[in-house]
Image (cartoon, rainbow, N blue to C red):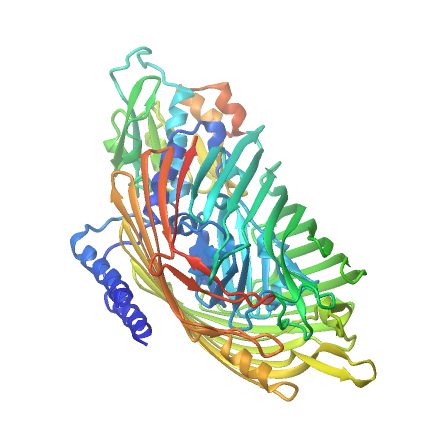
Amino acid sequence: MGTRKACLLSVLALLVLFPISGNAATDPLQADDEAEIISNMKIEDLMNVVVSSVSKKEQLLADAPSAIYVITQADIKNSGVTSIPDALRMAPGLHVARIDAHSWAITSRGFNGLFANKLLVLIDGRSIYSPLSAGINWDEQDTVLEDIERIEVIRGPGATLWGANAVNGVINIITKDSADTIGLLASGGGGSLEKSFGSIRYGTSLGQDATVRLYSKYFNRDSLSVIGNSGVDGWDALRGGGRIDWRPTGQDLLTVQGDLYTGTEGGELLAPAMSGAGMENSGQVPGGGAPYSITKGDTSFSGGNMLLKYRRTISETSDLSLQLYYDQAGRSNSSETERSKTADIELLHRFRPWKQHEIVWGIGYRFFHNNYTNSNDKSASTNDYNLYNALVQDDITLLEDRLHLIVGAKLEHNDYTGVEFQPSARLLWTPDQRHSLWASVSRAVRTPSLQETVLRVNTGPNTVYVGTSNFKSEELLAYELGYRIAVSKTSSLDFATFYNNYDKLSVMNSNSDGADSTTQMGSVNGMQAQSYGLELTAEWRPSNWLTVVGNYTYFRLNAQSSVSSTAAAALEASAPRHQASLRTTADLGYGVSLNLWGRFVDKVQTSFSNGQGSSIPAYTTLDARLAWKPTPGIEIALVGQNLLQPRHKEYQSAISGTLFELQRTVYGKITWQF
Amino acid sequence: MRTRILLFILPTLAALFLLVAPGVAADSRTKTEYMVKAAYLYNFLDFVEWPYEPVADIQKPYHICILGKNPFSGITEKMTDKRIRHRKVAVHSISSVEELKECHLLYISSSERDALPQILHALKSKSVLTVSDMQNFVNQGGMIGFVNQSGTIRFEINTKAAQQTGLTISSYLLKLARIIVTDR
């Protein structure tokens, strides 16, 4: 109670203290590095530096009729985060909960879980959402964090430009053009949770028109602690890859990039208990109904991807882009092996046939192949999935520079539910340079996962989970409203509010078939929900050396289900009602910078289909980063994470019900840049 | 209790800093673009020969002059240690062509777009390398114009304009540029 009030009070204090004078400054710490590096460049290198004439972030925010938050490279560096999921904690409207050392439950606007299925995540245009589980394997997704240009977090249905399953949000992770990463960057360090890590990246120009970058990264992370035990979830991973950007003429850009990775993670594996033996660790399966045993075991994962993107600027008002990618991923442990392959091709054209209309249209095709074998019950399955999509969007200028109406629709055809239609309409009003107001109505769908429609998985003796072919897509009708204001030259406020109406939500249903006493479980479209909330961001840059950013998120959800009222109640309690974060970055002089980041997340109730679950209390925590640059090319940083409490819980493992805890941790890192 | 205090102290401290800290005038929007253009200006000095210039006089600095609204403020101040051919480089802001005395390189800001013909006419008898990023600069008689090519900064050179005032541009620089020769 007290902490919540304090959060609201501090957010209010921030709003009250906004100054009126002064000038906005770019992130001071990054600007100095850039000036240093650029002033020492030779002409051939200068020709390859990519510049944006308006800060991409400001341009994105000023013209965007949606709830968007941009996490910049400076934010990632200054906060001291070591993974993409942790970087996402800086955005409002997202609930990021670490389940164990290598798993996170991340969602936007409710419906969180290990496989939160209403969020679309793209890395450079490649979707990392797995149709098998309808979720994201965050342990397989990583990059050299210094190579991330920005992460765009868009809450709300991004359906019109990105496709089905962007029901509650889209996260766009964009890596830097190789022309921006010339030179050598090497970093390494270690600490209590991050036992050891290192990465090396080298970029250079290839002739006059092309640049390339190659990288390699390794880390070894310790397990989180468990109440009463030490954890088993430590993991390590090795990753490498590269990117080439070629600009043969002023109008063409060709990018080819790829990554390869391999790793091992420890964890708890489910093995059906043989009669009698191994019953000491048995218990109720959160997702099933029969006794089982938990064993500790390692899962190894590996994979790779390749992406090709061609962009042609046809004229000032028209451009074309073609993208192809191939992604392969595999996981295996003592009982299961899974392999997936994805191939995708997409064409996008933007042009202005009439003065007031800017039209974007696109077509795409995705093929997904998956192979799953379970050595416990000797089951195996192979699945193929085809997705065809087409989109069109018209940005209509109703009043030049003042009022825009953006209407669009995406049509998709998938193998299970046929054609899905997702229209949206948005209005953007910019009365002057300082304010913008936007409103939108959209329809979005979450198409079924293979588990819900096709698979048949034995979760224990006498229990089987069966997909049903008439499982339909979940539907959302979303109403959103937002307002952005540059309060002064040094401060800005960004509000977003929404009302979401969900139908045909997935809920687990169990039938006991009396004949052979097999319990059959399956998903049915038996739940409806309505949610609403508010997301607020306040930014203040009073001087060249101080930045303060605060976020606040409020969320409520009501659910009804004729199939399972427990499931409806569980959904209502699964999202935190309040979340807040406050980050300050200060350049203290002599190359020293200090970053303080406080976060508050309200309590949540985890719940699994058999009614089991835990109450995760609200927590407040603080990360701090102290960094020193003795010379422009070297930075030494000391980072403390989760400092306020010796340990705290964020979520619960769905496999075993174990509650892992994040401890107070610290790590040191040295970065060299030439 | 501890946490409450901390979460309240941070913004209060921030407010106190505001009262004490000086304001800074810097426009964030085009920082990188002008850092790159500033670096180019220094580099250009290395590839141009001025007539009547004592070749080995390292005591005399190079002079870069900026005419009109200065987009490099806050940037060139950080480059004062740069030396070209062992000579220091001094950067000056001038508000009219009459103030031009010893400039080797004159950067004409796009704020002077409308007065360009008069400016170039006044420079006809002087050996000054003219550079700008305004549209169509080299077509109107400017010597080096910056162009944005797919997000990178490149440059065009009007060799005729440079030759007419006695400047020699190194073939190395010419190879890297998009060259235009006009009749102006």
Q: Nearer the viewer, residue A129 or A443?
A: A129
Tell me if residue B114 comes above or below residue A212 in the rendering.
Answer: below
Is A390 or A236 nearer to us in this picture? A236
Q: Is residue A661 above or below residue A416?
A: above
Name the outermost residue toward the front. A276
Where is residue A663, by image quadrant?
bottom left
- Residue A545 at x, y = what percent? 27, 48
What residue is rendered at 29% in x and 39% in y? A591
Q: Is residue A492 left or right of residue A230?
A: left
Residue A552 visible from this viewpoint: no
Q: Nearer the viewer, residue A194 or A539?
A: A194
Residue B76 location, x and y as percent? 31, 35
Q: Count numbered badges in the picture.
A: 0
Which residue is nearer to you in this view: B28 or A15? A15
Q: Quadrant of residue A536?
A: bottom left
- Does residue A51 show up? yes
Quarter of the image with the N terminus of chain B in it: bottom left
